[in-house]
Amino acid sequence: MAYKLYTLQSIPAHLLPRIALIHLGDAGLLSKLGFPFVMRYFENAVKDEKAFGFYVKDDETGEIMGFSLASPEPSALTFKLAEDKDWFIRNIIKAIFTRPLAFLQMLISSLTIRGQMYEPNTIECVYFTVDPKYRGRGLGRALQKALMDEGRKRGYKKIYASVETRNIASLKATQANGFRIIKTFREGIYHRHRLECNL
Ligand SMILES: CC(C)(COP(=O)(O)OP(=O)(O)OC[C@H]1O[C@@H](n2cnc3c(N)ncnc32)[C@H](O)[C@@H]1OP(=O)(O)O)[C@@H](O)C(=O)NCCC(=O)NCCS
C-alpha cells in the first residue's frame, strides 16, 4: 500500500468534508454532536495558527485514508465552535432536541476541559482517525508519529493524549509510539486513560 502524508493546513477546502466524514467514525463527543459541528470544528482547526495536523492519501486512488490533529491549546479549538453565536445557538438548540445525551455530555466535558491545566511547551494529540477500511495497516500509528515529529520540530517538549480505556486499537498505537499512562479518569460517560510522551 503506497500512501503519502500531507499537512492538514494545506488541504483543499473541497476535501474537508471527507475529513469530517472520517472523523464521524470516532466514538468521541464531537462526532456525537453530528456532522455540522464536526465540519465547523475542522474548518476552524485548519485556520488555527497553533494547531497542526496531517492527512494521508492513497497514491493510486487519491482517496484520503485518515488524519491526525494536535494543538498546544485544544480547548481553544473547542470554544471556537461558539465564536459564531448565531450558528452556535441555532445548532445547539437542534442538538438539545435531537441529541440530548450528547448535549449533556458537552456540558460535562466543557467543565472538565476548563479545569484542565495545560503546561507550556506541551501539545495534545487531539485526534487521530483512520477510515475503517484502511485500519490495522500501521496508518494510525504513522499519523500520530507525524504529530510527534512535527511537535519536536516546533520545539515542544511533551505530548499528551486521552484515550478511552476500551479503545484497544488507539491504546496500542499510542503506547507503541512511546506514550505511557499517567492516570485514569472519568468524564461523564467516558472512562479515559491520560497518557504522555517526551518529545
Ligand atoms: C485508533 C486508530 C486510529 C488506529 O488506526 P490503525 O491504522 O488501525 O492503527 P495501526 O494499524 O497503526 O495499529 C496500531 C496498533 O493497534 C493494533 N490494532 C489495530 N486495530 C486493532 C483492533 N481493532 N483491536 C486490537 N488491536 C488493534 C495494531 O495491531 C497495532 O498494534 P501493534 O503495533 O502491536 O501491531 C483507528 O482504530 C481509528 O480510527 N479508530 C477510531 C477513532 C479513534 O478511536 N481514534 C483515537 C481516539 S483517542
Image (tube, rainbow, N blue to C red):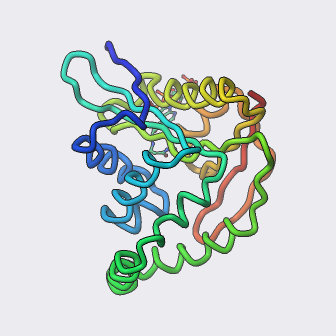
Identify which residue, 177 or 92, lies in the foreground: 92
Q: Is residue 140 left or right of residue 194?
A: left
Residue at 42%, 78% (x, y): give it.
85
Question: Which quadrant of the structure image shows residue 40?
Answer: bottom left
What residue is shown at x 50% (from left), y 64% (from top)?
80
Residue at 69 percent across and 65 percent down: it is 186
Q: Which quarter of the figure is the N terminus placed in?
A: top left
Q: Residue at x 48, y 31 (%)?
A: 140
Residues 152 and 1: in front is 152
Across and down, in percent, residue 23 comes to: 38, 49
Q: 194 above or below 90?
A: above
Tell me: residue 173, above or below residue 48. above
Q: Residue 189 vs residue 143: left or right?
A: right
- Seen in the picture, residue 6 relative to 191 is either above or below; the reply is above
In terms of depth relative to the viewer, which is nearer, 5 or 167?
5
Which corner quadrant holds the C terminus? top right
Q: Residue 77: percent from the left, percent from the top?
A: 54, 57
Tell me where residue 55 appears, x and y as whole percent: 39, 32
Please tell me in which quadrant of the rendered image residue 86 appears: bottom left
The location of residue 187, given as percent across then percent down, is: 65, 67
Examine the rendered structure and indicate whether residue 173 appears above or below residue 50: above
